[in-house]
Structure formats: C-alpha cells, structure tokens
Amino acid sequence: MGVVMSPLPGDILESEGVLNPASGRTPDGTLHLLPRLVAPGNVSRVGLAEVILDEGVPTGVKRRGVVLAPDAGWERGKANAGVEDPRVTWIPSLGRHVMAYVAYGPLGPKPALAVSHDLSHWTRLGPIQFAYQPDLDTDLNLFPNKDVVHFPEPVPGPDGELCYAMLHRPMWDLGWFRPGEGVHLPADVTDERPGIWISYVPVSEVEKDITALARPRGHRQVALSEHPWEALKIGAGPAPIRVDEGWLLLHHGVSGSIDDPFSPQEKASYAAGAMILDAADPSQVLARSAEPLMSPETEEERSGTVPNVVFPTAIEEIDGVLYVFYGMADAHIGVARLDRVE
C-alpha cells in the first residue's frame, strides 16, 4: 500500500535507515511502531512512533523518541553495536509487552528479551539462555540466532503442559567467528540451511519469575525451506495470529545467493509467505504458501541498503482489517493490507 516511515533528513540516528518495526498499542489504545533506527557505523536503536491513520488506513508516523539503545555491554563489540529487529508481542496473561530483539555484541547477533507495560519503558531480561538438551548433541547458545517472536498466549508444550513459546532461527555456520570451523548441525539435522525452531517455558515458571522467559527449553525444528522463493533460508515474521485453522505465521524466505551472512547482500531476494501451525502442537506445520504473498516490486523494495527486500515484522488489526508492516530494502518501512481469500 505504501511507505509509512522513511529516515528523517538531518537525524543522525536514522541516517542509515529505518526498518523492520515491531508494533503495539499503548495503554490508551493508540497504535505505535517500534522501528529499528540505524545510525552511522550500523549502530541500531529501537524507536517509538505513533501511527497516523487516515480513515483507518496507516499513512505515516509521529516520532516519540528512542526506547532501547545498545547501552548494555553485551550489546556492544569493539567495532559494532546494536539492538536490532525488534518483535513485540502483547501477552494478556502477563499484562506485558514482550520484546525479542537481536543484540549485536562481541560474538555477533544473539537474541535477547525485554518487557514493558507501556511500550516506552523497557526492562531487559537479558540474553536468551537456551537450556542444554542432550538429544540435540549441541548447545544452541553457541550459534548466532535471529527472528525470535513469541506466541500471544500459552500453547501446549512438548509434554502437554501449558507454556509460553518462542520461535527462533539458529544459524549453524561458525566459520564467521572461527575461520575454518564451518557448520555444526544438531543431531538428526541434515539440512544446514537456517530454518524456524520453537522453544518453550512453562507458564508456572514464568508466573513465579518473569525472567524465566529468557530460559527456554524443549527445542525442536518447525520448518525449513521448501520452495524456490525461500531456497536459502526462512525466518519467522510477526507474532503468530490465532485463526480457525490454527496459528497463522507470516515468514520471510530468501533466494539467490549469500556470500557473507553479516554483510549487505546484492544477490539475494527476500520475499514473504505464510504457514499455518497446529494449535494443539505449534511445532507442526499444517499448510504453507507455495508462492510468496509479497515479493520486492516497488522502487523502495528493490533499491536501498540491502536491495530486493520485503521483510514482515509486525501485524495489526485496525477496524477489522489486518495490516502488515515490513522493512523495505533495509531503508524504509512499508505497510500492506492482508486479506483472506478462499
């Protein structure tokens, strides 16, 4: 439908792009985006921006400042820093917004959590500490990980206990960190392409201590690339939405080629698709789109910091209509209407 946010001329904090926003509503019901703001040196912060509506349609934003910056030591390296690509889920049973974000620290991208009652003031829960799971024959904490997003309500865990669940995307190639180390796959995993995983925390533990959210377990693979438009890798988008068939999950898929996973890519293309996860067992995929729902088509999607990117990260219902907010070529934020067709 169009661009809703672009870098503000003269604002150094946005000079290298605004992209990949989270979303949420403040206590008064006002819809906000939480965009990633990129400053020189690829230093990212999370901002807050009220969404401007024209007859119920998002058309722009009013900036409300920065709500999260790479202030913690583990969010900064000697030559890098950033709190990147937030995903925010309002979880009514917790009475909190849960933000998952990528902390770009000394060992590269690691997932982290923060919580808030109002979208403006955030309390860090710290980096996610994936519990050791002997049957995987590895430690998930060794690997870079991105695209963490939470379900908005408790779901059945591996043993039937109600849990808070998160989707995430481990990346198995450790050559970026230790030259020559290469790919290390968990037991029984034979495809090295990054895909979507799920992990759980029992509701009973979180009720006692909110920081338990950052210590998930029960890790299992949910989905890998299947179709040409997602041949290289896939990752979760916005928080899943409950529908009659199960959980609707928008995801991104990448095709083309990637020479360096931590550098801007000229040869890759990011598109968006969807899958349905089983309500009784959200680690199971019931259906998925064989063709992308969105591909890079407009000038803003095809030309930018990283060309040929549509990257959905937030979805909101406005007057009964679903709108998807997404990153455009790592430079702008766009919005698209999501309609259901039979």
Image: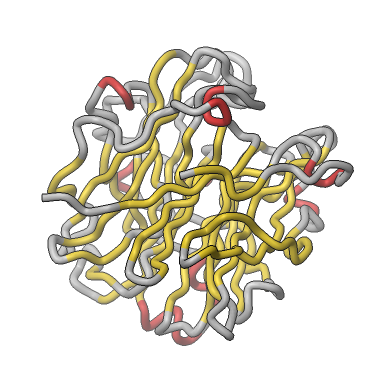
Q: Percent position (x, y) of residue 104?
A: 68, 43
In the image shown, does 113 or 178 lie closer to the viewer? 113
Left or right of 78: which side holds 266?
A: left
Name which residue lies at 59% across and 56% down: 112
In the image shown, does 135 or 70 lie closer to the viewer? 70
Total numbered labels placed on residues in the image: 0
Left or right of 206: which side holds 109?
A: right
Q: Is residue 318 above or below residue 42?
A: below
Can residue 142 be seen from the camera position used here?
Answer: no
Rendered image coloring scheme: secondary structure
Q: Percent position (x, y) of residue 93?
A: 40, 84
Name which residue lies at 49% across and 28% down: 298
Of the 4 image quadrants, the one containing the N terminus is top left
Q: Percent position (x, y) of residue 85?
A: 59, 48
Quarter of the image for residue 194 reads: top left
Q: Is residue 336 above or below residue 296?
A: below
In the image shown, does 179 or 56 lie closer to the viewer? 56
Can residue 53 be seen from the camera position used here?
Answer: yes
Name which residue lies at 84% across and 35% down: 40
Quarter of the image for residue 292 reads: top left
Q: Percent position (x, y) of residue 177?
A: 63, 26
Q: Is residue 248 above or below residue 179?
A: below
Q: Is residue 179 above or below residue 249?
A: above
Name which residue lies at 70% across and 73% down: 120
- Which residue is farthest front? 55
Left or right of 10: which side holds 181?
A: left
